[in-house]
Amino acid sequence: MRKLSLDDLHIFRCVALEGGILRAANKLNRVPSNVTKRIKQFEERLGVKLLSRQGRGIVLTDEGRTLLGHAERLLRMADEIEQEVCNGVVRGVLRLGSLESAASVKLPPFLSRYHKGYPETTIELQTGTTGALLRLVDSYEIEAAFVSEPFEQGNLSSIKVFEEELVLITPQGTPAIHSAADLGKHTVVAFPHGCSYRRRLIEWLSEAGVSPERFLDLGSYHAIVACVTAGTGVAIVPTGVLDNAVSGSLVERNALPKQLKVNHTHLVWQGEQSPQLKALIDLLPVLR
């Protein structure tokens, strides 16, 4: 039996993350038939099915998800060995996840410094809710993520890096919100389930025995602020995001209670830090 190779793992990983043979072939600069053949040979050697078709795309089997985690670690170790051989130069790809708020307000200065300080490293950044990002870290699809309190840390390592102030926004002309009870007749505009801010808001309302009239799930702060401006409902957003939003001055700002007002962003990762991640952490503030 031929031994498992890094090239096999690289091809498999690319197909898994791209979600299809054609997209993976384009990224690998290979013809699709070659990628299909390599995956089939790989599955035959392992004696398990790694991928299955779902509509026009491809999804991982349980065995495929297990292998993807190992593949990420092995390929990262190979990169680290190469870097040490090449006089300790930090190079390669750092795959990160981030909340949209951190990506748009807090991270840009640090990513700029990283870009200038480590020109041979590429950062791939994707945004999502805290819940979605934790799942990506857990499955090794990204190495680390900037997530918000509260979150289940589990076996992840973490550092607290940013502090932000949250504010409740309402349409102009809306009477001031003084307590959770005042929200009972309003629609709450928020990110889908998995968002830490949404979770904190629901817990606050539950403690007061309040249920919002409706929830409207949206996928970006620009859309959330715009909907509140248009009179759709209320929302909790970081002040930094609101200050930079096009319609940020067209809403009413309502102070939140202390337990909701101050929030922290954490950087989380699984296992050993890669040289690329270590270099980024060295640039970040660490809060106590």
Image: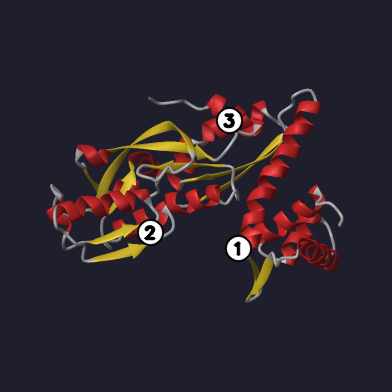
Task: Please report the residue visible at 86 percent of the width from the left and 57 percent of the height from the top.
Answer: 1
Q: Secondary structure at mark 1?
A: helix
Please say which color scheme the image uses.
Answer: secondary structure
Report which residue position mark 2 lands on: 193
| Front-most of residues 157 and 127 | 157
Which of the two discs, 1 and 3, sits closer to the camera?
A: 1
Task: Please report the residue visible at 71 percent of the width from the left and 65 percent of the height from the top.
Answer: 48
What is the residue that sits farthest to the bottom in this orientation? 55
At label 2, counting other C-alpha atoms closer than 10 Å, the crowd grade (few under 14, some 14-19, many 20 or more) is some
> Which corner quadrant of the image does residue 15 belong to?
bottom right
Amino acid under disc 2:
His
| Front-most of residues 109 and 25 | 25
Q: CA distance from mark 1 to mark 2?
A: 24 Å
Report which residue position mark 3 lands on: 280
- In x, y percent, where is residue 286? 45, 26
Amino acid under disc 3:
Leu
Amino acid under disc 1:
Asp
- In x, y percent, where is residue 128? 48, 52
Which of the two discs, 1 and 2, sits closer to the camera?
A: 1
**In this picture, residue 163 sits left or right of residue 274:** left
Relative to 113, residue 189 above or below: below
Report which residue position mark 1 lands on: 62
* Comes first in the chain, label 1 or label 2: 1
- Residue 173 visible in this rendered orientation of the protein: no
Q: Secondary structure at mark 2?
A: loop
Task: Please report the residue visible at 70 percent of the width from the left and 67 percent of the height from the top.
Answer: 49
**In this picture, residue 275 sits left or right of residue 151:** right
- In x, y percent, where is residue 36? 80, 67
- Residue 210 visible in this rendered orientation of the protein: yes
